[in-house]
Image (cartoon, helix red, strand yellow):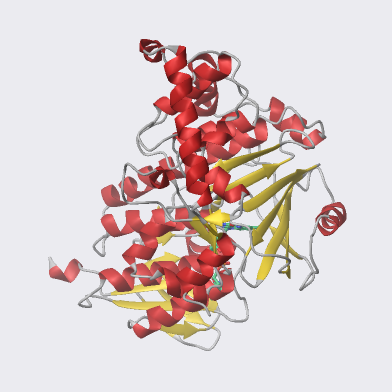
Amino acid sequence: MSDRRIRKIVILGGGTAGWMTAAALAKVNAPPQFDIVLLESDDIGIIGVGEATIPTIHWFNKLVDLPEPELLRETRATYKLGIEFVNWNGDGSRYFHPFGRYGGPHDASMFYHRWIRAHLAGDPDSHQDYSLTTRAALAGKFAPPATDPNSIFATLGYAYHFDAGLYAAFLRRRCESKGVRRVEGKVTKIDQDPQSGFITALTTHRGDVIEGDFFVDCSGLRALLIEGTLKTGFDDWSHWLPCDRALAIPTERVQDPIPYTRSTAHAAGWQWRIPLQHRTGNGIVYSSKFSTDEAAAATLQSHLDSKPLADPRLIRFLTGRRKKAWNKNVVAIGLSSGFLEPLESTSIHLIQSGIAKFLSLFPTRDCHPETVEQFNRVFDADVESVRDFLVLHYHRSAGRSEPMWQYCQHMALPDEVAYKMAHFTRTGRVVLTTDELFREASWFAIMMGQGLRPADYNPLLDGISAEENRSHLARVKQQISAALGSMLSHEDYIRKAAKLP
Ligand SMILES: Cc1cc2nc3c(=O)[nH]c(=O)nc-3n(C[C@H](O)[C@H](O)[C@H](O)COP(=O)(O)OP(=O)(O)OC[C@H]3O[C@@H](n4cnc5c(N)ncnc54)[C@H](O)[C@@H]3O)c2cc1C
């Protein structure tokens, strides 16, 4: 049995995906059972975008023992309570997708029905008034979720924005101190076993030959091993997610950083704004079928709120996923496994998801087909659920009339999206499968924000009177207002948490 054990893992690529994978492997490989080598090329560099996360990042930070104060200091991170969507349903429209729950600490999914009932009876309050996370974000305040389940602070949720370059460098230092060997060089030759097709070695332009039992392809959009060598194939989803280009540009810090990402819709795409401690990350994501690069650059530049620190950088991509993220003795983690576009900041989550699934299905050298199939099944389900969530944003955009949005409004939907929308509008229910990444609060936020309206609520709520329901909502609102009053500003909270002077 022991001669089937993996003795050497080679990671190709040192972007966010490569170093996150190395950090996770180094953590579980104690005492060492296998060598970990990471090969990257400074000449090629990393994509250098990917600065907003979602709350699943806490899982990874815990796995690799990454203390928050260090993360905040080393990567100049800020907190992220959610995303504000501006103009997504026509110019002048705005709504917030919070990471926390709506309602009071014990409301759970009944909150939505309580609010819908009051709303159908004419109550003018927005559902957003009942989200502490939303209200804190828009007020520029921050607090972490309380561990006491009876506290209104238990409804909060958060993630981080960080500098992608600093994050990769930070993880690299930690990995190297834990025994990960880094090799510098550009891969120019890839050897395969003639019988199995398994990859056996990578050779760099300097002549270094790096052999391995298992290879993690973190080579980014190049997908050098999984596609370049193994020709695994790609499912093109651009008919659902039509954006295929981005222009990224950093700008100076303008004010105290806000605790959320802003996404502003434009004629043929949307613009992101990610505030960090030392600068702001900006970019426009657009469809080359509906916009020229010049028009996108002009739109981006006319919507910046501070001085650019560099020229805009063009990134081309195709939305979709690799037909198999694990093929033979190669697993693709990060952009090499596919890309769905950055609207809900899900790529770093999918990196973690790939890492978690790989660790739980850690193979022997032969990579049994059942192990590989299980990985691909569960990873595919994760990617598809993210895709469906993104498709909803584009499709439900009735307030926008430009050709790209009209295309999205009329495109044929994945079945699951149509199913969820039908349930919600008829009954106010958000129907989910067990493993979906985005839960009720997220679907509710986007469905409401993009203009879907439920016609009814859960009939079980008729067990209480309309007056009792209204009083409950008023109590929650009052709790939220009191909580807001006691929260620190986002800037002050960062200083305190990062132990900055
Ligand atoms: C416009 C845009 C915005 C994004 N925003 C977000 C966001 O807000 N949140 C989020 O979660 N994700 C976001 N993403 C995705 C995110 O950027 C990536 O998931 C993340 O950076 C991981 O990239 P990577 O490590 O797979 O690839 P890369 O960073 O490109 O790294 C690839 C590595 O492979 C190496 N390499 C390639 N070829 C060779 C070779 N021949 N020899 C040796 N080494 C080689 C390179 O040197 C590099 O080290 C965004 C992506 C885009 C395009």
Q: Going 53% across and 83% down the picture, which residue do you hit?
A: 185
As displayed, is residue 269 above or below residue 125?
Answer: below
Quarter of the rendered structure image containing ligand 1: bottom right
Asked whether residue 235 is in view, the answer is no
Above/below status of 220 relative to 129:
below
- Which percent across, then down, holds residue 456? 51, 13
Q: Nearer the viewer, residue 234 or 353?
A: 353
- In the image, residue 327 sits, relative to residue 122, either above or below, namely below
Q: In which quarter of the image is residue 45?
A: bottom right
Residue 472 can be seen in this image: yes
Vertical arrangement, residue 123 with respect to residue 191, above or below: above
Q: In this view, does 11 lie to the left or right of 49?
A: left
Residue 419, image x and y in percent? 50, 22
How many numbered discs?
A: 0
Q: In which quarter of the image is residue 465?
A: top left
Left or right of residue 295, residue 87 in this image: left
Of 284 and 187, the residue lying toward us: 284
Q: Determine which quarter of the picture holds residue 448.
A: top right
Position of the N terminus, as image quadrant, is bottom left
Q: Residue 340: horizontal and vertical position, in percent?
A: 58, 48
Residue 244 percent location from the top left of the image: 69, 50
